[in-house]
Amino acid sequence: MRPRLSRRLAAFVVLTHAGALVCLLALPVAWTWQVAGFGLVALSGLWQAWTHLWPRTPWAVREALGGEDGWELTLGSGRRVQASLAPSTYVGPRLVVLNFQGPAWRRWSLVLPPDALDPDLLRRLRSRLRLGVAGR
């Protein structure tokens, strides 16, 4: 599966980071700390956008293929790695977060809101994950 750009995830990233910036304005601290905070929040927003919205970082998951003996992930660098599904994977009615474990303690996440995949594909993925047959 190759997720497409999710407007819901983009709105969530923008709203949460804008909220953090508003909270920074309300803090009674020196302006130098506020400028530093603005920089950190902006860096966090860019990190989330490049990793989860538009997977451009070398470690971002661009594609995930589940099989009988695990998952094959295609990363932003074009590299393919074998991974297994971590127990911390979240399956909800409006959000699926696939957490993967790879060799040498490597970990990756793939965030799948409802508009990131075809609805039928997402429904089948949720069913397989809940039944525990999604390539552990």
Image: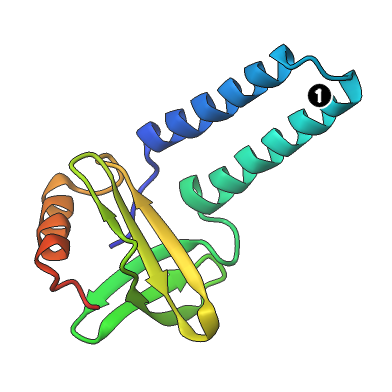
Residue nearer the viewer, 60 or 34 = 34
Q: Position of residue 133 (x, y in %)?
A: 13, 73
Residue picked out by circle 1: 34
Instruction: For the N terminus, give its image quadrant.
Output: bottom left
Image side of residue 39 versus residue 109, left or right: right
Figure quadrant of residue 130 = bottom left
Image side of residue 81 versus residue 130, left or right: right
Q: Residue at x 39, y 70 (%)?
A: 100
Residue nearer the viewer, 94 or 90 = 90
Q: Position of residue 33 (x, y in %)?
A: 85, 27
Image side of residue 4 versus residue 51, left or right: left
Q: Position of residue 117 (x, y in %)?
A: 25, 49
Number of on-image labels: 1
Q: Is residue 69 above or below residue 57?
A: below
Badge 1 element: helix
Q: Residue at x 35, y 48 (%)?
A: 4
Q: Residue at x 9, y 66 (%)?
A: 131
Q: Is residue 116 above or below residue 108?
A: above
Q: Is residue 54 above or below residue 15?
A: below
Q: Is residue 32 above or below residue 25?
A: below
Instruction: For the C terminus, give its image quadrant.
Output: bottom left
Q: Position of residue 21 (x, y in %)?
A: 66, 22
